[in-house]
Structure formats: structure tokens, C-alpha cells
């Protein structure tokens, strides 16, 4: 693939993966794990919300430092960071709602505003929101801050839809999945802007994952499938690891920025 060089002749390597079918599969699974892993650590293992939040935030900080220190995209650390930020995003919302008593409506609105402001600051600074040009530390920091707010917003929005609005887990999953399908249709057939389409789909995958996680893990009497958080985490994490290993070997999700 052709490379783009700066004035010093240095090759610019994107720090995030190319958007492929593998990307979306791992992303949706990571969002589901974010929901179920947080519940498993908090409830099933009895760590409690506060302890779980501090431990996972510490792990995320280490992973982010490692990710940002890398000079190019490496699948294992990138997707580890995504999984951890998914868990932390869930815990942020859970802390606001369960510990501080903030309503799901308020958290959804607040994180929507925070995400919008992050996009505005990113665009004002870099003149682009494209994920195909994440080759500076500043752009990468904007990228990860955006990802964090999408996960926190998705958790709040997903819980608001399935529980606050009483849509139920299945109906919520179908609605968010349908919205993603609509964005995909508009992108391929109506020429919807690629950057806009990506971020809308990315945001929607979080409440989709949250709804799917609750659907599979919650008891049958509560509208779930009763599989439990341990089984979901074990299966989904195994698949994620297998796909990341596959991408590491095949390099199907790597790109050098083109001129």
C-alpha cells in the first residue's frame, strides 16, 4: 500500500485498525463484554462497584499508556484497551446511577453533551474526525476520549431504553441493530458521509452491545435468556482473542496512510 511521507521522509502509520468486518465483530463483542464483565466483577465476584471501578480504571490507565507509547497499531494492545475502556465506561455510568442517584435520563443527556463537545474540540484542533489519520499523540488522545464517552453514553442510553423506557432487552437490541442497519444502508446506497456514518454506527454499537449483554445474561423471569455473565464473558473473550490473533498474523486490519 502506498505510503504518505512528511517533510522529514518519516512514514506516517495509523495507530488504529482499518475498518473491516472483523473490526465491527470485535467491537460489538467488546461492548457486550464491557456490560457483562462489569456486572460479573461487581456482583458475581462480590468486589463491589467502587473496588471494581478503581481496579479497572488502573488497568485501563496502564493499557492506555502502553497503547499511546507504541509507534504503530498493534492489535493486542489496541483491543485490550477497547475492552477495558468498555468496562470502565459501563462502570462510570453505573457509579453515577447506582452510587450517586443520577437518573438515566440525566446521564444520557450529560454524556451526549460531553461527546458532542469532544467532537467539536477535536475538529477545531485537527480539522478532521477521520480515524484514518490517527498518527499524532494529540489525535490519539482525542480518539480515546471520544471512545470513552461513547461507551459511557451507550451504557446509559441502552439501560434507559431497555429499563427506563421499558422497551425490554430484545426490543432494545432490535431497535439499535435496526438503526445500525439503516446507517449502513445510507452509507452504501445514499452516499452518507463516511466519517459521519462511522461515528454514528460506532456510538450505536454500544447500546446494542449493552442490550445484547443484558438479554443473554439476565434471568428469564426478567426478560433475559439466563445464560449468566460468566459464560458470556468466557465465550466472547475467547472469540475476541482468536480474532485478534488472526489479525496479528494476517495483518488484514493494518494500513499505512495513503496520499
Image: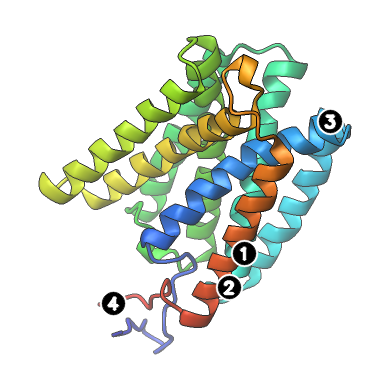
Say which element carries label 3.
helix
Whether residue 114 is situated above or below residue 259 in the rendered picture = above
Spatial separation of the CA atoms under disc 1 and disc 3: 28 Å
> How busy is the neighbourhood of tag 3: few (under 14 within 10 Å), some, or many (20 plus)?
few
SS state under label 2: helix
Give how far across and how far down residue 16 sits, in percent: 47, 64
Answer with mark 3 or mark 2, whichever residue precedes in sequence: 3
Q: Nearer the viewer, residue 49 or 141?
A: 49
Between the C-alphas of marks 2 and 1, the distance is: 6 Å
Residue 27 on image: x %, y %: 49, 51
Residue 137 in view in this figure: yes
Q: Distance between the residues labelled 3 and 2?
A: 33 Å
Q: In which quarter of the image is the N terminus?
A: bottom left
Residue 50 is marked as 3
Mark 3 vs mark 2: in front:
2
Q: In which quarter of the image is residue 237?
A: bottom right
Dot 4 or dot 3: first in sequence order is 3
Spatial CA span between label 4 and label 1: 29 Å
Q: Is mark 4 on a helix, strand or loop?
A: loop
Asked if residue 110 shows in the view, the reply is: no
Confirm or deny contact between disc 3 and disc 2 (CB under 8 A): no
Snapshot quadrant of residue 221: top right
Determine the residue located farthest toward the left in the rendered image.
190
In three-dimensional space, the C-alpha distance between marks 4 and 2, rounded to whole angstroms, equals 26 Å
Look at the image and tell me in which quarter the C terminus lies.
bottom left
Q: Horizontal placement of 170 versus 191: left or right?
A: right
Residue bearing mark 2: 245
Instruction: Tell which tag, 4 or 1, sits nearer the viewer.
Output: 1
The residue carrying mark 1 is: 241
Amino acid at each position: 500500500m502506498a505510503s504518505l511521507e512528511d517533510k522529514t521522509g518519516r512514514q506516517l502509520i495509523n495507530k488504529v485498525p482499518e475498518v473491516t468486518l472483523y473490526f465491527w465483530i470485535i467491537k460489538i463483542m467488546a461492548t457486550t463484554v464491557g456490560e457483562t464483565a462489569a456486572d460479573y466483577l461487581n456482583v458475581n465476584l462480590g468486589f463491589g462497584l467502587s473496588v471494581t471501578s478503581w481496579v479497572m480504571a488502573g488497568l485501563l490507565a496502564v493499557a492506555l499508556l502502553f497503547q499511546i507509547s507504541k509507534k504503530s497499531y498493534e492489535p493486542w494492545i489496541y483491543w485490550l484497551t477497547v475492552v477495558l475502556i468498555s468496562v470502565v465506561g459501563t462502570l462510570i455510568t453505573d457509579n453515577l446511577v447506582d452510587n450517586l442517584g443520577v437518573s438515566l435520563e440525566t446521564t444520557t443527556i450529560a454524556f451526549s453533551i460531553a461527546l458532542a463537545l469532544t467532537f467539536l474540540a477535536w475538529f477545531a484542533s485537527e480539522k478532521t474526525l477521520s480515524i484514518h489519520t490517527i498518527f499524532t499523540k494529540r489525535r490519539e488522545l482525542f480518539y480515546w476520549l471520544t471512545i470513552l464517552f461513547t461507551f459511557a453514553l451507550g451504557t446509559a442510553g441502552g439501560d434507559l431504553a431497555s429499563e427506563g423506557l421499558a422497551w425490554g432487552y430484545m426490543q432494545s437490541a432490535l431497535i439499535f441493530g435496526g438503526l445500525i442497519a439503516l446507517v449502513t444502508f445510507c452509507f452504501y446506497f445514499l452516499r452518507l458521509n463516511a466519517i459521519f456514518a462511522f461515528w454514528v454506527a460506532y456510538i450505536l454499537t454500544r447500546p446494542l452491545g449493552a442490550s445484547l449483554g443484558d438479554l443473554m445474561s439476565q434471568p428469564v423471569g426478567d426478560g433475559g435468556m439466563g445464560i449468566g455473565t460468566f459464560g458470556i464473558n468466557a465465550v466472547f473473550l475467547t472469540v475476541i482473542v482468536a480474532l485478534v490473533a488472526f489479525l496479528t498474523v494476517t495483518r488484514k486490519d493494518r494500513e499505512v496512510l495513503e496520499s
